[in-house]
Structure formats: C-alpha cells, structure tokens
Image (tube, helix red, strand yellow):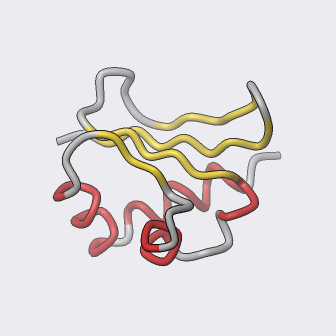
Amino acid sequence: MSIQYRVAFGKNDEVVEGPDDAEVVVTLASADAALTPEVAFMRGKLKNTGPTGPLLAAFADGSAAAAISRLASRP
C-alpha cells in the first residue's frame, strides 16, 4: 500500500512525496514537522485520508519520520 506525504509551508505552498494515486495521503504543516509523526497524529496535527493501518506501519518502521523530515527541510 502506498503513502503520499505532504508538508505545507503556507497556503498553496506544499511539497509532496509519493504517488498521486496513493491509498493513504498524509498532510502536516511545516511548523509541526518538529514533532514526531506519532505525536503529531495523536495531537491532531498530522492528518491522513485512507486506512490507518499502513500509516501506523510507516510510524513503526520509521519511513514516515524520514519522509516528513526530508520534505520539511526543503532548500
């Protein structure tokens, strides 16, 4: 199952990683990217569409944190 990550820096200013036809889409504001994905999810800062199981698996294997970190540190 594929996941698309989106980190928003402002209105109409976001960076995206992952396929456009992903089953799960994760969105997070850049200001909240310093939180771990699990904490951001529990606080309601990290939003997702689609099934939660693949997202929890991405939390467990560290791939969500890595993708969000890459996107939040854009040049």
Q: Is residue 15 left or right of residue 26?
A: right
Return the residue found at the far front.
44
Residue 2 placement (x, y as % from top left): 25, 39
Q: Is residue 45 left or right of residue 49?
A: right
Please state which of residues 21 and 39 is positioned toward the viewer in this rendering.
Answer: 39
Q: Is residue 28 left or right of residue 48?
A: right
Point 47% across, 43% down: residue: 5
Residue 74 placement (x, y as % from top left): 75, 47
Residue 34 placement (x, y as % from top left): 68, 72
Q: Is residue 36 left or right of residue 63?
A: right
Residue 72: image quadrant is bottom right
Point 50% across, 58% down: residue: 46
Quadrant into which the N terminus falls: top left
**Is 64 rendered above or below residue 36?**
above
**Is 10 rendered above or below residue 45?**
above
Q: Tally the numbered discs.
A: 0
Point 67% across, 64% down: residue: 32
Residue 39 placement (x, y as % from top left): 49, 77
**Is 26 rendered above or below residue 46?**
above
